[in-house]
Image (spheres, grey):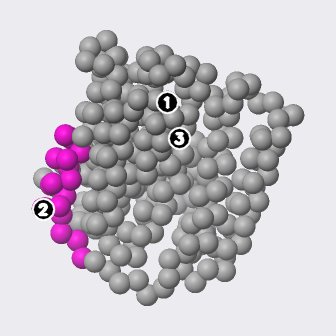
Amino acid sequence: MIFGALLIAMFLSSLDQSVVSTALPTIVGDLDAVAHEGWIVTGYLMMIAIVMPVYGKIGDMYGRRWPFLFAISVFIIGSALSGFATSFAMLVAARCFQGLGAGGLVILSQATIADIVSARDRGKYMGPMGAVFGIASVAGPLLGGWFTQGPGWRWSFWLNVPVGITALLVVFFALRLPMHKASKPFDFGGAVLLAVATAGIVLLTSWPSISPDAKYNWSNPWLIGLLVVAVVAFAAFIWVEVHASDPLVPLKMFRDPVFSVAVAIAFIIGQPNPGS
C-alpha cells in the first residue's frame, strides 16, 4: 500500500508536466496570454528544481514523513488553485506554488524507498519508480488532449486533487518513519545560493520561451544580468558548501564515480536522480 502511494506521488508530479504541455495552447488561448505561455511550464519546473535538494536535506535531518505529507498537501492546493485560475498571472503563481510541492513528491517518494526497503531488495522497487516517467510521458499527452476536447483544460489540474488526497491519506495512516533530531544547523546560506543559481539556470535554458524576443538576444541587459547572477551565485554556493559544517550538498559525493555518472546521466536526460 505504501509503495502504491509513493508511485502515485511520483506519477502525479511527472504526469502533470506532460498533461499541461498538451493542453497549453488552449490554456493560453482562453487566458489571452499566447505570448507568455512558456511561463506556465517554466515556473513549475523552476520551483521543482529549487526545492528538491531542500526537501532531500530536510528529510535527512528530521525524517521524511512530515516533509512528504507537506509536499503532497502543497501539490494538491496548487493543483486546485491552478484549476480555478481566472487570469494568466494567477495561473503562473499557482503553478509555481504547485511546483513547490511537486519537488518534494519527486525526491521524497524515491528517498523513502531507501528508508523502508533493504538495500538487497531496493532495485525491485526503484525499477517501477523509474518506469513511472515513461508511462507518464505516454499517458500525459493523451489525457491532456482528452481534457482539452472534453471536460475542459481545468481538469488537467483538478484531476490531481482526488488522486493526491488518496495518496495523502495512505501516507498519513500507513507510513511510519522515525523522526530525527538534527545535530547541526540547516545550511540556509547554501540553500539560498543554490536556489538563485538553479533559478538562473532554468530561466537561461528557457529564455526563448519566456522572453519577448523569443530568442537569445545577447544585447538584452536582462539576459546578461541573469547569466552573471547565476554564475556568481553558483561560485558562491561552492565556496559556502566547502566551508559549511553540514552542507546542503556535500561535494565529497562527487568523488564517487558511480554517483557522478548517475548525476551526469540524470542531468542529460532531464530525469531526477533516484540516488540524489
User: Magenta segment: does it hold 168?
Assistant: yes
Residue at the spot 17% in from the left edge and 61% down from the top edge: 172
- Residue lying at 56% horizontally and 34% vertically, measured from the top left: 39
Under circle 2, the secondary element is helix
Residue 117 position in % (x across, y down): 24, 64
Whether residue 160 appears in this view of the structure is yes
**Residue 161 magenta-drawn?**
no
Judged from this view, the residue extending furthest toward the right is 219
* 252, above or below 22, in the image: below
Boundaries of the magenta span:
162-178
**68 or 29, nearer to the observer:** 29
Choose the circle earlier in sequence order: 1 or 3.
Answer: 3
Q: Which residue is mark 1?
A: 88
C-alpha distance separating marks 1 and 3: 12 Å
Residue 123: horizontal and vertical position, in percent?
30, 54
Question: Which label number is shown at residue 255?
Answer: none
Kind of residue at badge 2? Phe
Q: Visible in this render: residue 129?
A: no
Q: Secondary structure at mark 3?
A: helix
Question: Residue under circle 2?
Answer: 173
Please, what is the three-letter code of the amino acid marked with disc 3? Answer: Gly
The residue that mark 3 highlights is 43
User: Mark 2 touching mark 3, by CB under 8 A?
Assistant: no
Q: Earlier in the sequence, mark 2 or mark 3?
A: 3
Q: Residues within 10 Å of mark 1 (few under 14, many from 20)?
A: many
Residue count near mark 3 (Cα–Cα under 10 Å), binned few <14, some 14–19, many ≥20? many
